[in-house]
Image (cartoon, helix red, strand yellow):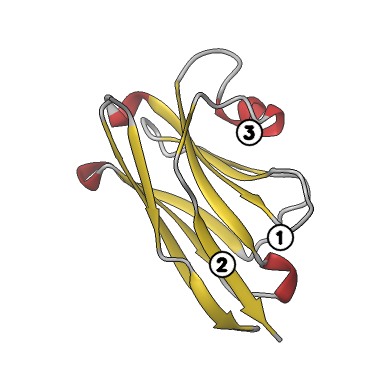
Amino acid sequence: QVQLVESGGGSVQAGGSLRLSCVASGFPFNTYCMAWFRRGPGQEREGIASIYTGTGVTGYGDSVEERFTISRDNAKNTIYLQVSSLKPEDTAMYYCAANPFLSPGCFVRLRGRAYTYWGQGTQVTVSS
């Protein structure tokens, strides 16, 4: 079955950086949309970035700053989220998600939070 396992979260000081990882299994990795979402305390789930693993084309949420970078390593069935210059407002549970590459596409799905498979999340806590 589909499994998504996130790692790399933790407690960091403001200004620091983290790289989150999501290892996928149970499906043909290079034909899927993959994405990162987050949910902060008392907030709705927010789409951060999507990537089509077949081509590496990426898309970012409207309010996402350039501090966030999504990437993938097809040989390792893994996607990453690099976050730099962390701020306290980045404190959230970060989730990896996956969906077969079908219409309407990876980025539209990011906006609509329309991904089928979800990981358990990895917590990021940023202190000032």
Mark 1 element type: loop
Counting residues from the start of the chain, the first of labels 2 and 1 encountered is: 1
Res 69 quadrant in image: bottom right
Counting residues from the start of the chain, the first of labels 2 and 3 encountered is: 3
Say few, some or many: other residues with alpha carbon within 10 Å of mark 1 (under 14 / 14 to 19 / 20 or more).
Answer: few
On screen, residue 92 versus residue 6, left or right, reads: right
> Which residue is found at the position 78% from the left and 50% from the top?
43
The location of residue 120, given as percent across then percent down, is: 46, 46
Mark 2 element type: strand
Mark 3 is on which residue type? Leu
As drawn, which residue projects farthest toward the top?
A: 103
On screen, residue 58 versus residue 3, left or right, reads: right
Q: Examine the rendering and report whether any part of residue 64 can be seen.
A: yes
Mark in front: 3 vs 1: 3
Say few, some or many: other residues with alpha carbon within 10 Å of mark 2 (under 14 / 14 to 19 / 20 or more).
Answer: many
Counting residues from the start of the chain, the first of labels 3 and 1 encountered is: 1
Mark 2 is on which residue type? Val
* Quadrant of the snapshot with the N terminus: top left
Mark 1 is on which residue type? Glu
Could you say which disc has been placed on residue 124 in the image?
A: 2
> Which residue is found at the position 60% from the left and 72% from the top?
125
Circle 3 residue: 110
> Which of the two residues, 105 or 18, is positioned nearer the viewer here?
18
Q: CA distance from mark 2 to mark 1?
A: 17 Å
Res 56 quadrant in image: top left
> Which of the two residues, 58 or 26, is positioned nearer the viewer here?
26
The location of residue 116, given as percent across then percent down, is: 50, 24
Q: Where 51 sits versus 117, above or below?
A: below
Q: CA distance from mark 2 to mark 3?
A: 20 Å
* Circle 3/circle 1 CB separation < 8 Å: no
Circle 1 residue: 65
Q: Examine the rendering and report whether any part of residue 17 can be seen.
A: no
